[in-house]
Image (cartoon, grey):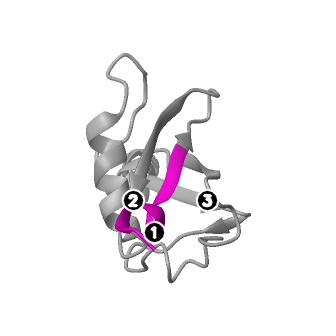
Amino acid sequence: MAAGQDLIELKFRLSDGTDIGPHKYSPSTTVQSLKEKILAQWPKEKENGPRTINDLKLINAGKILENNRTLADSRLPVGELPGGLITMHVVVRPPIADKKNVSTPRYLTSLALLMNLCP
């Protein structure tokens, strides 16, 4: 079997239906490496794009793929789709609000209210 036949052809479907790829990858490629490539190729004109690879989730066959796993570990159908193209879905995790900063004004408001009530 030639080395080129061992490669897995992937494209990445973004939430708006556009794609990144297709490109061919070795089965030993890690999910983290895929995320780095997606981040580098992310369309600059898209709003709310990922800032780091931690903002990205890759989903294949309904499963979220873990960063430290390889394509082979992730049980992609390597030999089942000869010449086939695998589409992975890319989800951008929205920025998480800092709960500490969000609730601070409430406490300050309550404290100010108590200070006014208790001379």
In the rendered image, residue 108, in percent from the top left (x then y), is placed at: 36, 49
The spot of residue 89 in percent (x, y) is 61, 48
Mark nearer the viewer, 1 or 2? 1
Asked if the residues shown at circle 1 and circle 2 are in contact, with their CB atoms under 8 angstroms apart, the answer is no
Q: Amino acid at mark 3?
A: Ile
Residue receiving disc 3:
59
Q: Is residue 92 visible?
A: no
Q: What is the magenta range?
A: 1-11
Separation (CA) of disc 1 from disc 2: 9 Å
SS category of the residue bearing label 1: helix
Quick one: label 3 or label 2, which is nearer the N terminus? 2
User: Real-space Cα distance between discs 3 and 1?
Assistant: 22 Å
Q: Is residue 36 above or below residue 78?
A: above
Q: Is residue 4 magenta?
A: yes
Residue 88 in view, yes or no: yes
Q: Which mark identifies residue 25?
A: 2
The mark that comes first in sequence, 3 or 1, is: 1
Residue 27 lies, with reference to residue 105, above or below; the image says below
Q: Amino acid at mark 1?
A: Asp
Task: Determine crowd level at label 3: few under 14, some 14-19, many 20+ residues with C-alpha closer than 10 A.
Answer: some
Is there a contact, CB below 8 Å, between mark 3 and mark 1?
Answer: no
Locate residue 6 relative to residue 63 in the image: left or right: left
The secondary element bearing badge 3 is classed as strand
Residue 81 spot, x, y in % from top left: 69, 62
Viewer-closest of 119 and 100: 100
Neighbourhood count class around disc 1 (C-alpha, 10 Å): few under 14, some 14–19, many 20 upward: some
Q: Amino acid type of disc 2?
A: Tyr
* Front position among marks 3 and 1: 1
Residue at left offset 45%, top offset 69%: 6
Mark closer to the chain start, 1 or 2: 1
Q: Residue at x 31, y 35 (%)?
A: 41
